[in-house]
Each structure stands twice: as C-alpha cells, then as structure tokens.
C-alpha cells in the first residue's frame, strides 16, 4: 500500500495458495516506516499474531525481523536458522566444486 515515496505495509494472515494481492484471512497490524514518531510506526495485534504462529503460520523473513524487533518471537532461534542455511549453502557449493573438478579430470583423460 502507500503511494510513491511513501511506503505503508499491512500485515495479515493469508493462505499460501492465495494470490499476492488476494483475500486476507485476518488483518494483524500495519507498519509505516515513514512515520516521524517511532511509537506510531508499527501497530501489531500481538495476541492474534501469536495465535497464528502457534497454528503453523510462516512469516516472511521481513515480517520475522519485525516480530523479533518487537520481542514477539525469539531472535536466537532465527540466528540458528540463518546459520544452518549458510552452512548448507557452503556445503552445497563445496560439493558442486568437487564434482565439477572431478568431471574436468575425466575429460582430460
């Protein structure tokens, strides 16, 4: 939402099969990064957000960062997930490099 050079975001519970701008199951709050007063930048319905998280909702990375900043979810658990993703990417890159160098040796023979 918003207008040019004036972003405004709504947070909502949405079914994953719904189109990007499709129907929202429940509005959970909003975020206005341009508000001058820090207390008016974000409004979250904490009780309903916790309900949806317990029900299995998966917030986007950006929303997860907002929830961590507002102490709704644990930031330490998020750091663990990010570290695991980084390690998995490194392992996949090393495996790909090893298989690529193995193929080059076979081609030279």
Image: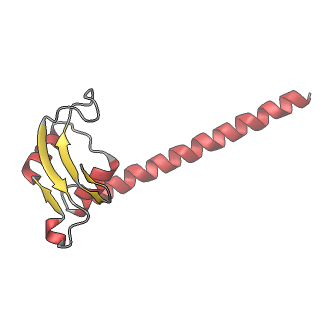
**Identity of the residue furthest to the bottom in this view:** 37
Q: Image quadrant of residue 21?
A: top left
**Identity of the residue furthest to the front in this view:** 4
| Residue 12 image position (x, y, % from top left) | 17, 43
| Image mark count | 0
| Residue 30 image position (x, y, % from top left) | 17, 53
Q: Residue at x 58, y 47 (%)?
A: 90
Relative side of 25 to 107, left or right:
left
| Residue 24 image position (x, y, % from top left) | 16, 36
Is 3 in front, or is 22?
A: 3
Visible residue check, residue 10: yes
Relative side of 13 to 63, left or right:
left
Q: Quadrant of the C terminus?
A: top right
Q: Is the residue 98 above or below the residue 18 in the image? A: below
Q: Is the residue 39 above or below the residue 106 in the image? A: below
Q: Is the residue 78 above or below the residue 17 in the image? A: below
Q: Residue at x 26, y 31 (%)?
A: 16
| Residue 19 image position (x, y, % from top left) | 28, 30
Q: What coloring was used for the rendering?
A: secondary structure
Visible residue check, residue 74: no
């Amino acid at each position: 939402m918003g207008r040019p050079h004036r972003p405004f975001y709504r947070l909502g519970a949405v079914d994953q099969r719904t189109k990007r701008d499709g129907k929202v199951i429940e509005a959970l709050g909003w975020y206005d990064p341009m508000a001058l007063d820090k207390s008016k930048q974000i409004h979250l319905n904490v009780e309903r957000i916790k309900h949806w998280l317990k029900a299995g909702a998966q917030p986007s990375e950006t929303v997860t960062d907002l929830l961590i900043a507002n102490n709704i979810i644990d930031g330490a658990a998020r750091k663990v997930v990010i570290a695991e993703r980084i390690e998995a990417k490194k392992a996949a890159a090393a495996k790909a490099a090893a298989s690529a160098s193995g193929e080059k040796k076979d081609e030279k023979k």
